[in-house]
Amino acid sequence: MPSSSSSSAANSPPIRVFPDMPDTPAVTPARPAALERDMGNAVRALAMDAVQKANSGHPGMPMGMAEIALALWDRHYKHNPADPHWPDRDRFVLSNGHGSMLQYALLHLSGYDLPIEEIINFRQMHSRTPGHPEVGVTPGVETTTGPLGQGFANAVGMALAEKLLAAQFNRPEATIVDHHTYVFVGDGCLMEGISHEAASLAGVWQLDKLIALYDDNGISIDGEVRHWFADDTAQRFRAYGWNVIGPVDGHDVAAVDAALATAKGSGGGPSLIICRTVIGKGSPNRAGSERAHGEALGEAEIAATRAHIGWNHSPFVVPPAVYAAWDARPRGARMQAEWTRRLAHYEVRHPQEAAEFKRRMRGELPAHFAAAVQAAVRAAVDKKETVATRKASQLALEALAEAVPEMIGGSADLTGSNLTQWSKAGSLRTVNGLQPGRHINFGVREFGMSAIANGLALHGGFLPFVGTFLTFADYGRNALRMAALMKQRVAFVFTHDSIGLGEDGPTHQSVEQASSLRLIPNMDVWRPCDTVESIAAWAAAIERRDGPTSLLFSRQAVPFLRTATDLEAIRRGAYVFSEAPGGAGKARAVIIATGSEVPLAVQAQQQLAGQGVAVRVVSMPSTTVFDRQSVQYKAAVLPEGVPRVAVEAGVTDLWWKYVRGTGAVLGVDRYGESAPAAAVYRHFGLTAENLAAVVSQVIGR
């Protein structure tokens, strides 16, 4: 099959302009029944053949959802396979991502740059058809799915992005943002708690261009779900404020087509289409059974299935007529050309808005952002405020969020504690019509909040951030992991970052969380010590285009002790905060500190200086960023042969890679205590006096 040359791997795809072509409707008329049957069976055959060749995968869902996919992709889905990054394309999310061969078959058949060789190499090393769909690997895949329910939440974020961009940029005479978000979900997605969190918010936000199609086949890996999943799903979603359509016969293309048309015209809220299906449809001996779910059918059963569905073609062979029917490129090019004309008309009437829309969709920061960062740092140095770093974070937001209008974020019912709102943000409200503020009240929904933020980032046009207490990072952990895996530009704000929150006690004192976040590959973690480092951390998170950032802030006030400010040094993750008396060559030890423990290090340095011991203090706000620096820079900050002592109000294991065997680590390797912060610090020996004593012991005094 011919293929285009586009790729979804580019970080900042340009807005492509297609030649002027006649208008075409988004909806394709019904095709002859025999051709539609073959189109659906092409999906079934590719799925069962690819899984069989790999001897790994999930054939049942693609076989059961073939007609649902046909109704959507052939009659409603607005996309252009030649340009997977077209800004006004519909978004499609396969939340039940274990059935990845459904999406790969659709992408291949409709004309994306996914040739048959990639289908044959399903689940093989370095193929573009990995076990679960991965954004940036396969053209046309909008998000990485597999952890059930998260794709559904991503879709909520995408639909929210569309709604807010439309409110900001559309004009009565020129609409440039007008697309739907479609998400396929299965029983597993709806059993996961995240689906409750995300569905509730989607209803509150009245996301009327979000349409979920539920594969209601009654089967999961363990068998018939009626024994453990007896929810009234229709009533549940109606209670969330969704339009519920069905049940419909998920194997009747016309019925699913009609349900989609109804959903697109419903308005007032998102829509759930309940589609009754048979898992493994077409397989004579596996259909309707858990045996069709997660294992290859076997050669004999595939042969029986071919005969049963009337598919008389060899493995991985699709007739030209079926390819031609599935090919979405001509129609996609016409739809994109029509949008390009609208965008050109919009540019004439609204040139500034058009330029801003293009900039945001490219993911580029405003030209004046660097100047805003410098101005914020100068103001912080002038004020020299002793504040909690969570307040320093809010001061950074005040300065930087106004310079970056695509920034949007909020908190899981902790706005007044996380300080994630700034004075001009405004709050997102939809009760009396859309009020598109930039602060979002997510309610107590850490997991859903984090995955929705991923969806906002994936859609484009926004730079999302979300906040909660650090100890609740575990509630959203897998969404943080997915942000890192997908290399998405999301900032996760975590306040109350240590035993320093005091009286709330060990349930809230997150001794292990900072280190655990640093273990996530591709997650940058910052724990600043003052306003200047907080601004630098926020700037780094905003500028980063290849992954997420976790920002950790204190509840308690931290004194401003800075005597010099080298923003570029801070941006490298670690730097000399306070040089040893007499200069670098005089240091007998290096104290490495982070966050609220930097003042302890400075106080210990002063005490040791009084005893005639010169010590260098290194602030290491980001171990992850520092680890990427050159060997030469690392040696300049942490000179070889000089003993090192690290201090952080958390678990100690991570810090041994910096101090090595000749040093020491002062931290907390057990859960905390309920008491005022100062008392808890004393209890665990996190005092300047004890730190100085540890340094003395290390250098043999």
Image (cartoon, grey):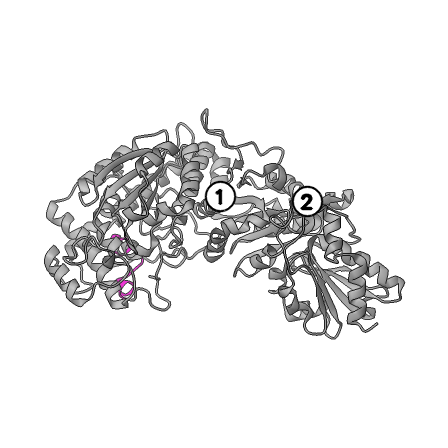
Tell me the distance, in whole angstroms, between the alpha carbons under discs 1 and 2: 27 Å
Q: Secondary structure at mark 1?
A: helix
Q: Is residue 565 visible?
A: no
| Residue 24 located within the stretch drawn in magenta | no
Is 527 left, or right, of 352 in this rendering? right
Which numbered mark, 1 or 2, is in the foreground of this view? 2
Q: Earlier in the sequence, mark 1 or mark 2?
A: 1
Instruction: Determine which residue is flagged by label 2.
Output: 503
Residue 55 screen position, x and y as percent? 27, 67
Quarter of the image where the C terminus is located: bottom right
Q: Which residues are magenta?
A: 106-120
Is residue 38 positioned above or below 410 on the image?
Answer: below
Q: Nearer the viewer, residue 445 or 683?
A: 683
Residue 101 in the image: x percent, y percent? 28, 57
Q: Which residue is mark 1?
A: 449
The N terminus appears in which quarter of the rendering? bottom left
Q: Residue at left 31%, top 36%?
A: 234
> Residue 511 appears at what percent x and percent y?
63, 55
Can residue 253 be seen here? The reply is yes
- Placement of 629 over or under 551, stated as above or below: below
Dot 1 amino acid type: Met
Residue 107 located within the stretch drawn in magenta: yes
Q: Which residue shows up at 81% across the image and 73% down it?
A: 700
Q: Position of residue 448 (x, y in %)?
A: 46, 44
SS type, badge 2: helix
Q: Amino acid at mark 2?
A: Glu
Q: Is residue 153 left or right of residue 257?
A: right
